């Protein structure tokens, strides 16, 4: 989506994607059956049983996703074993490539996909304006899915206001990464501790003017947690900028720079697995922010397998489904009743830490604005 070609392709396909297509509507939700809890249970259970039966007749569900082969295998095995539904996958170089594939298919009046699992911005920038997405609330059946007490911060993590895209994962992002041999945790109790004169010229930052963890950091700090004036003060500390994540983290581990802003969870995990033990992730008292990290789901209209997609949607968001898909992805579920034994310890949400919602679309859109703002604030020439 960052290329001119991608933008032109989307604009050419937009009119075709919005054109009327053969109806393959999702089944309507069951009407409320009364106040009695027994009757209510009978109502949703009947709706669920009927939907599963119809899904079995459809036989399969088609998912477009850039998730790992392990995730695809685990989800496919579970759906087949539990519901007798075969999962057919389409994969690509990333969410943007898959989105462009969907738009091309719709231009040819082909409606091959039921659901997408993965990232947000290409879906929001291209599929949503093309009218390809469905509001999701109408497809909830399982009570445990809509029971917000089972979800972190007592809410479902909607990405957009129209509720067409729902995050099911919510991982804690690195507030500050330090060399623990040099920096004590109490020396970074607040983001404002970065302004201590002793750290001037000793802070390394992933380039915030390009897409990546540095850009996510300045956006979250400037927009969600503190404000732009803090970023202006930080610029006077003369941080050094770099773009190669492995090198950044190795420099901090070796002590060339004691502090890193814009840490990469994947890189930290890789280095820790290779024996590096002195990279510490600190969440200052102002808190940090949450990312869905490709853990989100959306359903497409004119789906070829509407009942199977509805079963997938409800199951993915259940505790059982979250245990399967989040284990495959190595993510912490946004549900609070799902284990975390497969999650990197430094990405697990901790009691008492404040977490800003950077999952919502408004926050994610701000990243482009902050990339330009960072160039000005930090006087980045490249």
Image (cartoon, rainbow, N blue to C red):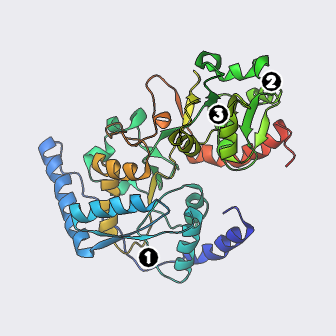
Name the element at disc 2.
loop
Label annotation for residue 253: 3
Q: Residue 309, image x and y in percent? A: 34, 65
Look at the image and tell me whether residue 217 can be seen.
yes
- Lateral position of residue 151 relative to residue 375, left or right: left
Which mark is nearer the camera, 2 or 3? 3
Which mark is nearer the camera, 3 or 1? 3
Q: Quadrant of the N terminus?
A: bottom right
Q: Residue at (31%, 55%) from the top-left corner?
A: 314
Name the element at disc 1.
loop
Where is 117 relative to 61, above or below? above
- Lateral position of residue 221 relative to residue 57, left or right: right
How packed mark 1 is, by other alpha carbons closer than 10 Å (few <14, some 14-19, many 20 or more), is some
Question: In the rendered structure, are the residues bearing label 2 and label 1 in contact, judged by CB atoms less than 8 Å apart?
Answer: no
Q: Which residue is mark 1?
A: 112
Question: In the rendered structure, are the residues bearing label 2 and label 3 in contact, judged by CB atoms less than 8 Å apart?
Answer: no
Q: Which badge, 3 or 1, comes first in the chain's sequence?
A: 1
Label annotation for residue 200: 2
């Amino acid at each position: 989506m960052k290329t001119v070609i991608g933008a032109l392709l989307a604009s050419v396909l937009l009119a075709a994607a919005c054109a009327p297509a053969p109806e393959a509507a999702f089944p309507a939700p069951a009407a409320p059956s009364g106040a009695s809890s027994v009757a209510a249970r009978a109502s949703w259970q009947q709706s669920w049983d009927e939907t599963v039966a119809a899904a079995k007749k459809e036989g399969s569900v088609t998912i477009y996703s850039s998730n790992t082969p392990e995730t695809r295998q685990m989800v496919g095995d579970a759906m087949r074993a539990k519901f007798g539904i075969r999962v057919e996958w389409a994969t690509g170089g990333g969410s943007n490539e898959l989105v462009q594939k969907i738009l091309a298919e719709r231009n040819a009046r082909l409606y091959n996909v039921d659901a997408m699992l993965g990232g947000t911005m290409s879906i929001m920038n291209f599929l949503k304006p093309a009218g390809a997405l469905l509001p999701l609330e109408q497809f909830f059946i399982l009570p445990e899915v809509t029971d917000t007490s089972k979800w972190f911060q007592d809410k479902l993590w909607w990405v957009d206001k129209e509720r067409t895209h729902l995050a099911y994962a919510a991982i804690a992002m690195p507030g500050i990464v330090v060399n623990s041999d040099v920096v004590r945790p109490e020396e970074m109790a607040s983001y404002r501790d970065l302004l201590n004169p002793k750290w001037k010229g000793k802070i390394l930052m992933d380039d915030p003017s390009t897409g990546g963890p540095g850009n996510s950091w300045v956006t979250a700090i400037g927009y969600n947690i503190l404000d732009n004036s803090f970023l202006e003060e930080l610029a006077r500390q003369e941080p050094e900028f770099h773009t190669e994540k492995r090198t950044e983290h190795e420099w901090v581990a070796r002590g060339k720079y004691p502090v890193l802003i814009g840490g990469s969870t994947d890189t930290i995990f890789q280095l820790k697995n290779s024996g590096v033990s002195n990279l510490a992730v600190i969440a200052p008292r102002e808190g940090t922010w949450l990312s869905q990290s490709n853990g989100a789901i959306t359903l497409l209209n004119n789906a070829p397998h509407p009942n199977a997609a509805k079963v997938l949607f409800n199951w993915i968001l259940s505790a059982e489904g979250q245990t399967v898909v989040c284990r495959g992805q190595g993510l912490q579920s946004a549900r609070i009743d799902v284990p975390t034994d497969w999650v990197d310890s430094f990405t697990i949400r901790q009691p008492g830490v404040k977490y800003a919602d950077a999952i919502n679309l408004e926050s994610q859109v701000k990243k482009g604005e902050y990339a330009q703002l960072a160039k000005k604030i930090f006087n980045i020439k490249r």
